[in-house]
Image (cartoon, rainbow, N blue to C red):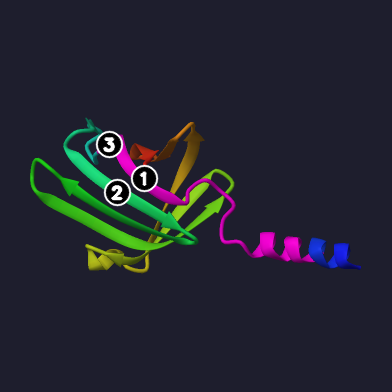
Amino acid sequence: MKRYLIFLSLIIISCSAPHNNDFSGVWKYVSGSYTSDDSTTKSTSDEIKSIKIFSGNYYSLVTQMVSSDNFFAHSGLYNLEGDSYTESFKMHKNPEMIGKSETFTYQMKNNQLIISNEFMQEVWERIE
């Protein structure tokens, strides 16, 4: 009976865990490639400083554009389904984005997280 209760408890805990993945932690931006509306592609690395933090179902992102001294920030919930990763914006520097979401495909390679969609690809590296 005890074994049955322990087994049942483990099943309930594993089913209720927010995410069983390697996203949790602190990630720094390594590089990115972005395609604009006119189909020109721009790659970046040193001119962007960014940190993304994942904990439970939540994420938070702060980005600084070094060359222009601009920053971007958003935070909210994230969800994983297969190889899809969706950020649902609860806070955003652009108020029009609050309540919206963005979906990407993702891959984990070694200590890196690669997220992409039709307009961009970013590489993030775990720092904590």
Which residue in the rendered view is the most extreme toward the left?
68
Magenta stretch holds residue 51: no
Q: Are marks 2 and 1 in contact (CB under 8 Å)?
A: yes
In this figure, which residue is indicated by the disc labeled 2?
Answer: 51
In this figure, which residue is indicated by the disc labeled 1?
Answer: 27
Of labels 1 and 3, earlier in sequence is: 1
Q: Is mark 3 on a helix, strand or loop?
A: strand
The location of residue 75, given as percent across then percent down, is 34, 62
75 horizontally vs 36: left or right:
right
Q: Locate the N terminus by quadrant.
A: bottom right
Q: Relative to 104, does residue 1 appear above or below in the rendering?
A: below
The location of residue 73, given as percent across then percent down, is 25, 58
User: What's the distance in space between the residues labelled 2 and 1, CA to CA?
Assistant: 6 Å
Magenta stretch holds residue 9: yes
The location of residue 56, given as percent across then percent down, is 49, 61
Q: Residues within 10 Å of mark 2 (few under 14, many from 20)?
A: some
Q: What element carries label 2?
A: strand
Q: Do the residues labelled 3 and 2 touch (CB within 8 Å)?
A: no
Seen at 24% across and 41% down, the residue is: 37
Range shown magenta:
8-35
Type of amino acid at the residue the image marks with label 1? Trp
* Residue 6 vs residue 83, the one in the foreground: 6
The location of residue 92, given as percent across then percent down, is 27, 64
Residue 76, picture quadrant: bottom left
Of labels 3 and 2, earlier in sequence is: 3
Seen at 8% across and 45% down, the residue is: 68
Closer to the eye: label 3 or 2: 2
Residue 48, picture quadrant: top left
Type of amino acid at the residue the image marks with label 3? Thr
Seen at 43% across and 39% down, the residue is: 113
